[in-house]
Amino acid sequence: MQTDATYSDAIKLKYPESVVVAIAKDPQGKYNPISLGWCMCTSIDPPMLAISIGLTRYSLEAVRSAGAFVVAMPSEDQEADVMLFGTKSGRDMDKLAVAETTTVPAAKIDCVLLDDAVANFECKLVGELQTGDHVIFAGEVVASHMNPDKPNRLYTVGAGHIMGGLPRKWKR
């Protein structure tokens, strides 16, 4: 039986939720990561991913300026960096210089990959749509990478940014 609830109460039941790190080169030439809870596949042919970034976020202009972005699916041991990328602004600091994670150059776009992530997807920006207080960016995946040594993805598992890994129970 369904009962009436406020949006703020009912939406708390969405967990666990995927968490990704989007990275784009900002207008000053710095690679800027941001942790995001909203990412989805939007097409198989061609492969496309979409991310949603708040209107007030520094990363919004970085994605627009770069015309490309990386979507990294962090491993469970990247929790500290994911928290840093989601709670600090690239306006104020070089988050990758402070983070413990290692980056490697992207293959087809001007960006970097998170080396310890479970997977990285290089995306060329193909469109955007403002939806209330966020912008959805759609990107065509032009290169994909995976790390077989990092099998467990990091997820947001509860309200208040509680994170944890969920084991993959299938073979690649």
Image: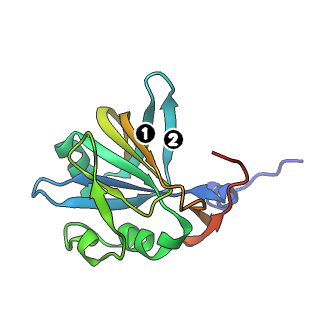
Q: Name the residue under label 1.
A: 50
Which kind of residue does numbered mark 1 sit on? Ala
Viewer-nearest residue: 27 or 165: 165
Tags 2 and 1 touching, CB below 8 Å: yes
Mark 2, secondary structure of its residue: strand
Above or below for 63 versus 80: above
The residue depicted at 54 percent of the width and 62 percent of the height is 150
Residue 67, by quadrant, is: top left
Residue 141 lies, in percent from the top left, at 38, 35
Q: Name the residue under label 2.
A: 40
The residue depicted at 17 percent of the width and 54 percent of the height is 26
- Mark earlier in primary sequence (2, 1): 2
The residue depicted at 20 percent of the width and 46 percent of the height is 110
The residue depicted at 23 percent of the width and 66 percent of the height is 90
Residue 34 lies, in percent from the top left, at 35, 60
Mark 1, secondary structure of its residue: strand
